[in-house]
Image: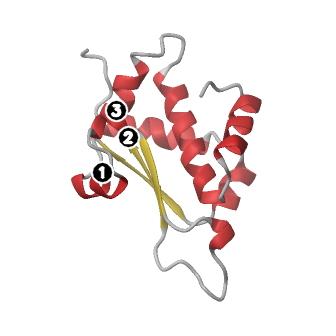
Amino acid sequence: MTDEPDLDEFREMTEAAYLGLPEAFRRAAGRISIHVRDLAEPDVLAELGIGNPMGLTGLYQGIPLIHDSVSHPSPDEAKIFLYRKPLLAEIRTRPGTSLQELIEHVVIHELGHHFGWSDEEMHDLLDEEGHEH
């Protein structure tokens, strides 16, 4: 497919997805950075026990806010990674979903890990937002 976004366009879509979240949600997230890559690094995949890099669309790295504290602050900034190639492959299996919607879904899901939410809580939030999961 020639109309697939390159990494820069994908980064712009990811930033738009994050900026499209309610301001209170973004403010509550605090210091977090979002990164886009074509694929996850081999050491990350090995650490997660994932053999095929196409199997990972997004990743949260950091200590969830519920475990962070003033007396024991997280030494590293929390990070969210979105992986372009696996997301492009996944969108081909979701005919009724746009790439932007899928990116928004993954951003919300990874932010949920940052907030320390369970998968069930994230599914409930995504249902409220009208997203498929």
Q: Observer-nearest residue: 42 or 19?
A: 42
Tell me the crowding category of disc 1: few under 14, some 14 to 19, or many 20 or more residues within 10 angstroms, Cα based: some
Q: Give SS at disc 2.
A: loop
Left or right of 1, for residue 105: right
Label 2: which residue?
56
Tell me the crowding category of disc 3: few under 14, some 14 to 19, or many 20 or more residues within 10 angstroms, Cα based: some
Q: Does the residue at mark 3 contact the one at mark 2 (Cβ under 8 Å)?
A: yes
State the image quarter where residue 58 is shown.
Answer: top left
Please count the marks in the image. 3
Name the residue located 46 percent from the left edge and 24 percent from the top edge.
Answer: 99
In the rendered image, the vertical position of residue 92 relative to residue 69, given as above or below: above
**What numbered label is drawn on residue 45?**
1
Q: Tell me residue 28's x, y (percent).
A: 70, 60
Q: Observer-nearest residue: 108 or 16?
A: 108
Name the residue located 49 percent from the left edge and 43 percent from the top edge.
Answer: 15
**What numbered label is drawn on residue 86?**
3
State the image quarter where residue 50 is shown.
Answer: top left
Which color scheme is applied? secondary structure
| Amino acid type assigned to the residue bearing label 1 in the image | Leu
Q: Does the residue at mark 1 contact the one at mark 2 (Cβ under 8 Å)?
A: yes
**What numbered label is drawn on residue 66?**
none
Left or right of 12, for residue 89: left
Q: Tell me residue 84's x, y (percent).
A: 34, 36
Q: What distance separates the C-alpha of mark 3 from that of mark 2?
A: 7 Å
Left or right of 34, for residue 67: right
Q: Quadrant of the C terminus?
A: top right
In the rendered image, the vertical position of residue 55 relative to residue 49, given as above or below: above
Q: Earlier in the sequence, mark 1 or mark 2?
A: 1
State the image quarter where residue 128 is shown.
Answer: top right
